[in-house]
Image (cartoon, rainbow, N blue to C red):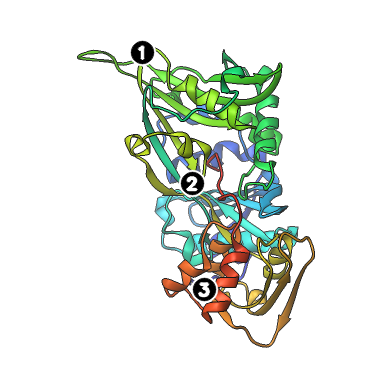
Amino acid sequence: MAQLPQPFTPPDGFSEVVVTQAMAADILTLDTWAFPTPQSIEELLGWASPLDWSRARALRSVERETLAAMHASYAFSRFPVPGATLPAAGLTWVGVHPEFRRRGLLKSMIATHLADCRDRGEAISVLTASEPAIYGRFGYGLASQVVSLALPRGAALRPVPASEQVAVTFEVFDPAKHLALVTDLHQRSGALPPGRPGWATRETTQLQEFFADDPESLRDGFESVRILVASTDQTPTGYALFRRKLDWGPTGPNGVISVREVVGLDPATVHALWSRLLDIDLTTKVNIRLVVLDDPLLSLLVDLRATQPKLSDNLWLRVVDVPAALAARRYAAPVDVTLGVTDAVLPANNGAWRIRAAAFSAEVSITKVDSAEINLDVRELGSLYLGGTSAAALATAGLLTGPPDQVQQLTSAFAWPLQPGSSWIF
């Protein structure tokens, strides 16, 4: 793992900048260097911004008097972990100007971010990576995976009782009318027992407004966002956000539907929403990118192979405070194990930690001990933490060591009834 410099110590030739909203144009200019975009700065300034400026940081080149790098984070005050929630930082907008690459700026920013997490009492940091090879060397472990699907129109679904009793309306998405509903249903769906770890909600006003923003230049020929609203007995139970793109082939209409998010509070609602999405005129394909590995759609499809599923990484998780993070979550089986954790970046995490808890109990004991039976790096602890990676699988890969019986106990305890995952990229 990379050895990081001390936080708040920028590399030679760079200085830290206090970021404010007044710097939005400079921040966006830097962002367009890090992530090329065809839009002008003037247009970007008109879009909703997701940033809490108090959580954004930047570095300036002393010689060139220009911004060289930045990062920010979202305040997830109730980030879902197995059986509970805890404060977490959603690392985002990490960018380095190409002129200043290979100068140690990323290492400095990650060190600063982790120090900020400690100061704010955020025991974990999470992110969705633009390049998955970057963050492992800083202690982030792959914590969840998703599949993307390309469903043919008319893809058969297995029947679900009462699906036909769910009323579904088709509407143009209107933030004033629909955003509060979407926010509420999204949060409630992730909290349905036993709870889905990693189901990050759009907690802040900035994130909600950014999610609802629909700039025309980003549509790539698709229409504005549409919404299906599902209701049972006139009570909303789910929604689907999507847009269509009309196209024609040699044999007739060849339109595509791009689905952004489907949320349902019960099986009948999920089935009703997908039934409508898979039967819209002038289309031949329905695409969706972020489907968690145990999403009900995967069980309902009669022919999963026909959807061309493609596996991808989703959440990456970095444990910032080992004892606090281990105490915050619940365990799916009785556990009494000792973990030897190595962390080359945050020395306070190093050592042997004993975990004792009954199955699904809020009473969790974490104590520091002299020695451990299971040994792993903090990166692997991040992979285990949400329940999406098996300790036994890490052991077979040589990334975790310990007696087989202890590894099996750890595997059962760290598992969770639902796979972790986030339905949106941050």
Please report the residue visible at 47 percent of the width from the left and 28 percent of the height from the top. Answer: 259
370 versus 86 height, above or below: below
Among the two numbered marks 1 and 3 on one chain, the one whose residue lies closer to the N terminus:
3
For discs 1 and 3, the disc positioned in front in the rendered view: 1
Disc 2 residue crowd, few under 14, some 14–19, many 20+, Cα 10 Å: some
240 versus 18 height, above or below: above
Give me the C-alpha separation between circle 2 and circle 3. 34 Å
Q: Amino acid at mark 1?
A: Leu
Q: Given contact means CB atoms under 8 Å apart, are the residues at marks 2 and 3 in contact?
A: no
Mark 1 sits on what residue?
282
Q: Given contact means CB atoms under 8 Å apart, are the residues at marks 1 and 3 in contact?
A: no
Q: Quadrant of residue 204?
A: top right
Mark 2 sits on what residue?
293
For discs 2 and 3, the disc positioned in front in the rendered view: 2
Q: Residue at the left extreme?
A: 250
Mark 3 sits on what residue?
3
Disc 3 residue crowd, few under 14, some 14–19, many 20+, Cα 10 Å: few
